[in-house]
Image (cartoon, rainbow, N blue to C red):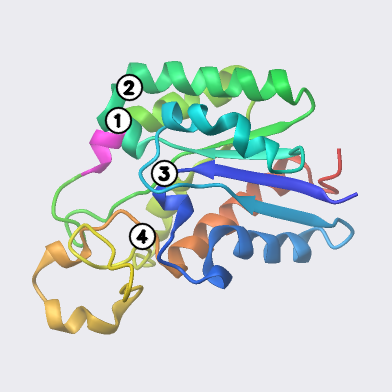
Amino acid sequence: MAVHLIMIGDCTLATSYLPPRLKNEQVLATLLRQRYPQDECVVTNEGLDGETVAQFLKRYERTFRRNAAPDYVFVRYGVNDRKAHGVDGFRTYLNQLCHQLRTDFPNVRLLLETGMYVDYPAHYEFDRNPVLQPIYEVIRELGQRDGYPVVDVYERMRQETAQGNWDLRVRGYGVVDEEIPVLGAGQDHLHAGDVRWWTNIHPNPLGIAVIADEEARVLQQHWPDTLRL
């Protein structure tokens, strides 16, 4: 039987501005075929733009009703939760979600993910990292407490940026043009010196490649031989 991995999360997972072949689930599925050639893996992306954990809980039942039972669930929330519910509210809802998943799917393997790092001050208008760091700490602490592997997207992106691989986000003054998204450096020369051009939290294809690689790395770290339960 196929191994089923479901991804739930916000806009940084949904990436509705990307063509299907460049989305997180497709890139991760390709990596899993390479790293687990003996496994048949199906990766489903149930991310939704602008969503919080509390909002996902309202569509929880219909989401899992239309999907095969998951063997793995990746959970990536926080950016919108910080604004909607604060750190304590996020902690409460994330605990509730994990408890419900473990209750409904006793054998499921949960992986918690932190979110985006921004390259301030070179490529972001303000330092968003300290604002989001308390949210990411909630994720890390819950993972450590309950034994869930953590895909630390923030830390991986921070390391990549420090090594010179900073071009991990789309362009566009804080919003993504859904019709003609700017996914890379092609127009950067037109906005030289205007840091607002890079002030966008959403991953571009290079960012998705880094995220998927980190997801695959964490899977291999915990389950090196097979993803089959």
The residues colored magenta run: 128-133
77 left or right of 200 in image: right
* Mark 4 to mark 2 CA distance (whole Å): 26 Å
Number of other residues with Cα within 10 Å of mark 2, as a class: few under 14, some 14 to 19, many 20 or more = some
Q: In the rendered image of this protein, does residue 191 appear above or below residue 175? A: below
Mark before the other along the chain sequence, 1 or 4: 1
Query: Looking at the image, do the residues carrying marks 3 and 1 touch, with CB atoms under 8 Å apart?
Result: no
Q: Which element is circle 2 on? A: helix
* In front: label 4 or label 2: 2
| Residue shown at 47% from the left, 53% from the top | 14
Q: Which element is circle 4 on? A: helix
Instruction: Identify residue type, mark 4.
Output: Thr
Residue carrying label 3: 115
Q: Which element is circle 3 on? A: loop
Residue carrying label 2: 87
Number of other residues with Cα within 10 Å of mark 3, as a class: few under 14, some 14 to 19, many 20 or more = many
Query: Looking at the image, do the residues carrying marks 1 and 2 touch, with CB atoms under 8 Å apart?
Result: yes
| Residue shown at 24% from the left, 36% from the top | 130
**Residue 96 point in image, percent of width and height:** 53, 17
Mark before the other along the chain sequence, 4 or 2: 2
